[in-house]
Image (spheres, coloured by chain):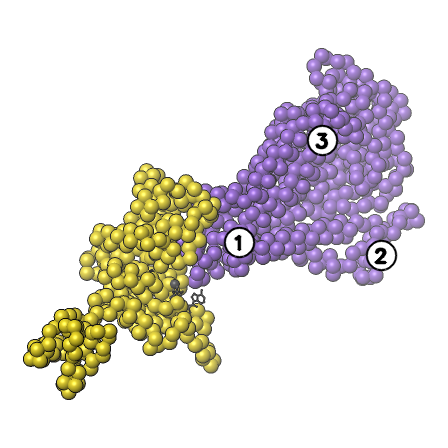
């Protein structure tokens, strides 16, 4: 244990000796200060309520209010319907406390045109367009689909059902503490709520540099704003910086240790060779862990101080990024032992990282394209490629309206990438995991369902298993070489 | 450990690097409480021998024992100190922090380290610089630190690969005294060196490696002793009766105003002394001539192959 600490301290000394560590620390300090300078002010009730029910501009980017799960939300199926919600006559009864706790009432008008429902995912199929039935009224259809228990017949549309449905959808999409929904006209409802259940749900207006630069375009629920900073900037771009700095700094660890005249000194200490290399490896991991903790932790504290939100999701991501790095560093260690050259280590590791990333990205895109299917009209490519495939009985009435499906990617390509993705560390899936850790605490239930779409097809045991196997194989080969070699 | 047991023993030790045969069956043993010097030209295999004993290099064949154990085992390393040639200490350490690091690896307690480190740095004369980063050290200072790290954990055997490389003359003398002190404490010191004068002064026994083979081994006195070579000097103006000596089968050469005579046996020098007395010559100078280690070494090497100890590459065996 003492020897381990000594090796760690040595690795630490080596890491902080270079300028990269300092630069990274300064950088995270600057970014943390920047985040600390952002102030968030809750906007007025009149402005806030419409913002909580944004219009759905694009069916590919569904809004939670229009996303429906059958069986009163219990089914894993998710469908998107094209109706829109218009909010007006917003009135607030201030209670003297925070705005978001004020009692509110507003008029909700549902406008529904005809149009398809899109099934965006169930089980292992991330996206599947269901144009099977074209509805004259998608709102009616949404209510009926929502109410249907698994395997049962769709019930008839009633006003009571519509009210229950709206209550459920409003709570899921806005996190308003809805107390009453009353029908006041044709597709017109009066909604009253006891404020929002959390300030995260309430749209806030951010401004930079302690209120000097207001950013009106980002008037979104606070949770969404924090999510944007944490998920996109910290866990996306920030993680990239941390990993890159980690790869560059630690690539020198093993080659430096193996220099002639340096390795002799270490090999004559009472430590097994395997122990020396493993300690070096763990030293690198701890270095990146500390770096990530400093970067993420600084921003997390800044956000907490400014918003009062101390959601620990971002802190868990420190472990996620460290695990990601563990894969890269195992590669770098192997190359270091084989070539004793830091530069080669960096180049090969970055290449490996890039290849794994490309495979993951292409695989994800192909899977989405492959599952995108217009029922009743087999995809063009599939028609040609697979003539024998038994087709489902067509819906005669809808046939004219059903467009051709988008072109399918070639089967072989899909298969190749399925295999490639299965046998490489699925770093894309790790990204998804960390994203989910962040969104879990910040987004509404509806938004989470949308974010969680990608998650459903991921088998975590498999992902961690494959990544772990890569680490084991890389380190195993490195150890084999290191333990048997003459220096 | 019994006193008579050898601390280091190799038996037919071989090492090949690819096609280079660095060691070709070296057998030697070093006893406890000895300063042992290993000499040889560049590339003779000296460092390779030490590295095999320490487990840094894997042997190809033969046996190597250190402190009664098979060389290379990690459990005896606590009892061994080592100064490598061309050592590269991590530049981000200070002298003191490096020794603290190594001390921790040796399992020394903090108290022990705090006591020993300033003490040993004082001994090698760099205590004042112990809190400076190593990148600010001069070559000789690094070398002194290297010696400090080889001895500070109180090892039983100390391997020093060219220990006085870069150290100034005064420092060398101090280090020599240090090694002798360690020997007197019962430690075994194994030195690789090219500084023959130094080796001659401090080593109890010496071995010479040549092309990976043991060419000579013995005490310094044994190696430098020369059978029956004497230097004779007479009073001014007197000449040695060369013809008479030649008749008796003795070879003489004039060196300056003295003569070197090679006599076959111990006793024969007395006949020369008697002869000189008979002739009425006045003997002023008579010494048995001793070679310096350097003479022995250079002579041996000149016979072999001057220059670097370069071997022809092993011819690849067919089918191997
Ligand atoms: N790692 C290595 N790979 C290949 N050949 C090596 C290696 N190390 C040493 N050799 C070769 O083995 C032979 C012995 O080298 P070694 O370093 O033991 O010599 P040395 O006696 O210590 O020489 P010097 O006095 O120059 O230090 C040399 O021919 C050298 O070229
Ligand atoms: Mg050498």
Residue B313's x, y, as percent?
A: 44, 76
Write down the residue under mark 3. Answer: A225
Q: Is residue B266 above or below residue A41?
A: below
Badge 2: chain ID: A
Q: Determine the CA span between mark 1 and mark 3.
A: 39 Å
Q: Residue at x 21, y 53 (%)?
A: B184
Which label's residue is closer to the chain start, 1 or 3?
3
Pointer 3 and pointer 2: residues touching (CB < 8 Å)?
Answer: no
Q: Nearer the viewer, residue B73 or A399?
A: B73
Q: Nearer the viewer, residue A427 or A283?
A: A283
Q: Determine the CA span between mark 3 and mark 2.
A: 41 Å
Write down the residue under mark 2. Answer: A380
Q: Quadrant of residue A143?
A: top right
Query: At numbered mark 1, what does the secondary structure look like: helix, strand or loop?
Result: helix
Badge 1: chain ID: A
Write down the residue under mark 1. Answer: A333
Q: Is residue A345 above or below residue B103?
A: below
Badge 3: chain ID: A
Which label's residue is closer to the chain start, 3 or 2?
3
**Colour of the chain lettered B:** yellow
Query: At numbered mark 3, what does the secondary structure look like: helix, strand or loop?
Result: helix
Which label's residue is closer to the chain start, 1 or 2?
1
């Amino acid at each position: 244990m003492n020897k381990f600490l000594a090796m760690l301290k040595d690795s630490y000394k080596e890491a902080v000796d270079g300028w990269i560590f300092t630069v990274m620390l300064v950088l995270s300090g600057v970014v943390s200060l920047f985040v600390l300078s952002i102030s968030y002010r809750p906007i007025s009730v009149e402005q806030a309520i419409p913002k909580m029910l944004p219009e759905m501009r694009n069916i590919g980017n569904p809004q939670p209010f229009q996303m429906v799960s059958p069986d009163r939300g219990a089914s894993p199926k998710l469908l998107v319907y094209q109706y829109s919600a218009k909010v007006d006559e917003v009135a607030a009864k201030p209670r003297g406390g925070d705005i978001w706790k004020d009692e509110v009432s507003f008029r909700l008008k549902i406008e529904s045109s005809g149009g398809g429902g899109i099934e965006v995912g169930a089980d292992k199929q991330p996206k599947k367009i269901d144009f099977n039935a074209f509805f004259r009224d998608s709102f009616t259809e949404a209510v009926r689909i929502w109410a249907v228990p698994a395997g049962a017949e769709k019930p008839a549309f009633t006003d009571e059902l519509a009210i229950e449905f709206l209550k459920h959808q409003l709570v899921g999409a806005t996190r308003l503490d809805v107390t009453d929904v009353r029908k006041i006209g044709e597709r017109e409802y009066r909604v009253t709520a006891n404020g929002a259940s959390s300030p995260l749900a309430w749209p806030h207006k951010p401004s930079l540099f302690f209120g000097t630069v207001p950013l009106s375009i980002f008037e979104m629920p606070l949770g969404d704003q924090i999510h944007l900073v944490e998920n996109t900037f910290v866990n996306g771009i920030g993680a990239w910086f941390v990993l890159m700095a980690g790869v560059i700094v630690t690539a020198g660890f093993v080659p430096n240790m193996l220099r002639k005249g340096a390795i002799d000194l270490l090999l004559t200490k009472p430590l097994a060779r395997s122990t020396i290399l493993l300690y070096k490896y763990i030293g690198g991991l701890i270095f990146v862990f500390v770096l990530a903790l400093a970067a993420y932790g600084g921003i997390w504290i800044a956000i907490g101080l400014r918003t009062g939100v101390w959601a620990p999701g971002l802190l868990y991501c420190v472990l996620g990024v460290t695990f990601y790095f563990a894969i890269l560093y195992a590669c770098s260690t192997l190359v270091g032992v084989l070539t004793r050259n830091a530069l080669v280590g960096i180049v090969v590791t970055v290449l490996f990282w890039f290849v794994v990333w490309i495979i993951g990205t292409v695989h994800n895109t192909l899977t989405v394209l492959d599952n995108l299917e217009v029922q009743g009209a087999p995809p063009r490519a599939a028609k040609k490629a697979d003539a024998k495939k038994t087709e489902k009985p067509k819906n005669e009435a809808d046939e004219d309206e059903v467009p051709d499906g988008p072109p399918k990617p070639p089967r072989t390509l899909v298969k190749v990438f399925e295999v490639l993705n299965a046998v490489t560390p699925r770093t894309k899936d790790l990204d998804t995991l960390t994203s989910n850790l962040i969104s879990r605490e910040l987004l509404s239930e509806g938004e989470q369902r949308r974010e969680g779409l990608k998650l459903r097809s991921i088998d975590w045991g498999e992902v961690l298993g494959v990544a772990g196997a890569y680490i084991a194989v890389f380190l195993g080969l490195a150890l084999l070489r290191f333990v048997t070699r003459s220096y | 450990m019994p006193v008579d047991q050898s601390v280091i023993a190799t038996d037919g030790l071989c090492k090949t690097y690819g096609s280079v045969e660095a060691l070709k069956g070296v057998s030697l043993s070093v006893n406890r409480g000895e300063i042992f010097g290993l000499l040889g030209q560049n590339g003779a295999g000296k460092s390779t021998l030490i590295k095999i004993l320490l487990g840094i290099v894997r042997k190809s064949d033969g046996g190597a024992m250190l402190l009664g154990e098979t060389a290379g085992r990690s459990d005896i390393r606590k009892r061994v100190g080592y100064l490598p040639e061309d050592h590269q200490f991590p530049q981000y350490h200070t002298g003191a922090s490096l020794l603290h690091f190594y001390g921790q690896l040796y399992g020394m307690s903090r108290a022990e380290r705090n006591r020993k480190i300033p003490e040993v740095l004082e001994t090698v004369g760099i205590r004042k610089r112990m809190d400076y980063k190593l990148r600010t050290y001069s070559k000789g200072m690094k070398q002194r630190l290297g010696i400090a790290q080889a001895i500070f954990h109180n090892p039983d055997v100390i391997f020093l690969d060219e220990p006085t490389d870069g150290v100034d003359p005064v420092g060398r003398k101090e280090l020599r005294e240090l090694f002798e002190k360690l020997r007197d404490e019962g430690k075994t010191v194994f030195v690789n060196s090219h500084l023959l004068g130094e080796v001659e002064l401090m080593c109890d026994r010496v071995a010479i490696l040549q092309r990976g083979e043991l060419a000579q081994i013995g005490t310094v006195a044994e190696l430098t002793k020369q059978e029956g070579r004497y230097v004779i000097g007479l009073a001014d103006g007197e000449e040695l009766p060369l013809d008479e000596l030649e008749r008796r089968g003795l070879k003489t050469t004039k060196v300056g105003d003295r003569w070197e005579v090679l006599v076959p046996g111990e006793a024969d020098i007395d006949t020369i002394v008697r002869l000189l007395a008979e002739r009425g010559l006045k003997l002023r100078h008579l010494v048995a001539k001793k070679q310096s280690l350097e003479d022995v070494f250079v002579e041996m090497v000149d016979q072999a192959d001057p220059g670097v100890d370069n071997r022809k590459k092993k011819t690849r065996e067919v089918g191997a």
